[in-house]
Structure formats: C-alpha cells, structure tokens
Amino acid sequence: SQQGEEDPQALSIQEGENATMNCSYKTSINNLQWYRQNSGRGLVHLILIRSNEREKHSGRLRVTLDTSKKSSSLLITASRAADTASYFCATDTNNQGGKLIFGQGTELSVKP
Amino acid sequence: DTEVTQTPKHLVMGMTNKKSLKCEQHMGHRAMYWYKQKAKKPPELMFVYSYEKLSINESVPSRFSPECPNSSLLNLHLHALQPEDSALYLCASSLTPVGGERVYEQYFGPGTRLTVT
C-alpha cells in the first residue's frame, strides 16, 4: 500500500514563480526524502529531512515536516523550465529493512 | 564516481524469451534495489539486497529472479514474462539499507525500458 499521498497531482506554473508540493503519510517515520524524476529517467535525490527536524533548505529547495500532521511540503523558489519533472516524496519507516515507500508524485510543468 | 549504470537501456522480448537486466555501481554501496515503475506511477519496490544477500522480496512472481554476484553488480533475470510486465525497471543503491539511525539516500540508475510482446 502507498504510504505517501501527494498533492497536487499536477502543477503548471510560469518560470520565476514558486512551486509548492505536499505529501501526507500514514505511519510514523524515521525520515522523509524528496526525489525528482525527469521523464522516463531515473530518480534523483533532492533532500532528506529526519523526523526530528522541522525545516531544511538546499539551494532553491525548502522542505518542511510536520510529524503531528504526518505531512511534508517541498517548495521550489524562482522556478526554471529545467525544474519540469515529477517529484516524489518517500518515507522510511521503522524496521522496514531498506524499504522506501514512495508517494504518488506531483507532475510539475514550468513554462518559459 | 556517483553513478549507477544499467544495461540495456531498452529491451523488447517475447513471452517465451529469457533475458537479463544488469546494474552496476562503484560507490562502495552495500545495499542494492530493484524497482518497477509504470507510466505516471511511483516506483514499486521489488527486491532489496543487503550485503549481497536478498533481504526483501515484495512477493514478486518467480518469473523475475534477482542475483547479486558481488557488491557492485545486480542482475534481474527474466523468464516467461507477461505483457503487463512491460515497464521501466530501475536499479538503485545506497550506502547501507535505510532504516534506524543511519539514513542514506538512494542513487538510481537511468532504468531499462522493458516491452514484453
């Protein structure tokens, strides 16, 4: 079963605008990760936030985690056409022995 | 070298064929993964190898047979596949399996696009 649910499923914005994607999950987690996937390619790790962290930044990326609401958000600031991709959250739960559970993903389109 | 390589990039096979997918990494990672991904869906975990031993099999049909000959290589042997097995097959690796206090991101290969006819 899918742990993560993401919204929106698809997001279309203009270059320079900010993009926000949300992820909700159901069980307690060790950490939450965000990955990007360009069409038909492998996934690229973007950022990891641990369960005891509330916010993390990496370049134009800002991730928040609210464990009380079991939710996370990924903010991409000043978006570029090259940010066009699918974005997935993935959760790592206790005692899963190597298992990441991916959300359904948000398909982001940034128009030049 | 932070790359996971996969061969072939594309594979078309009939339902009676036997083929293999290959994955290689030279990052010293001790956990390797196979995922299956359908169009517009998230990756679904198939197998996890931890220190060259199969640690997770997500109830994958026996027509998929994984093999980890050494810490750098991961194979997926395919036999008697069905058309619904057509998908993008992704290999990934991480320093050690996720879980517990040590947490590591997964590095993904570009995938093999498999079509079963």
Image: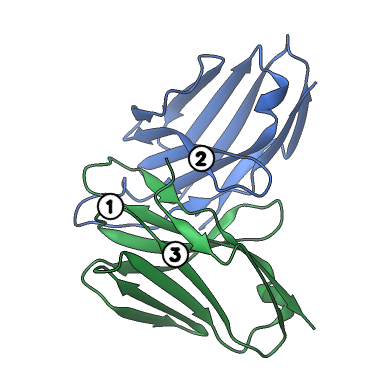
Residue behind mark 1: A27
Are marks 3 and 2 in one subunit? Answer: no
Residue B68: mark in rendering: none
Label 3 marks which chain's residue? A
Amino acid type assigned to the residue bearing label 2 in the image: Glu
Residue behind mark 3: A23
Amino acid type assigned to the residue bearing label 1 in the image: Thr
* Residue shown at 49% from the left, 34% from the top: B73
**Helix, strand or loop status at disc 1:** loop
Residue B3 drawn at (x, y percent): 55, 54
Residue A100 visible (yes or no) = yes
Which chain is blue in the rendering? B
Q: Is residue B116 left or right of residue A41?
A: right
A25 vs A82: above or below:
above
Q: CA distance from mark 3 to mark 1?
A: 13 Å
Assess disc 3: are there few (<14), some (14-19) or many (≥20) residues with their C-alpha within 10 Å of its C-alpha: many
* Residue shown at 58% from the left, 20% from the top: B77
What colour denotes chain A?
A: green
Amino acid type assigned to the residue bearing label 3 in the image: Cys
Q: CA distance from mark 3 to mark 2?
A: 17 Å
Which quarter of the image is occupied by the N terminus of chain A? top left
A38 vs B112: above or below:
below
Residue behind mark 2: B44
Residue B74 drawn at (x, y percent): 50, 32
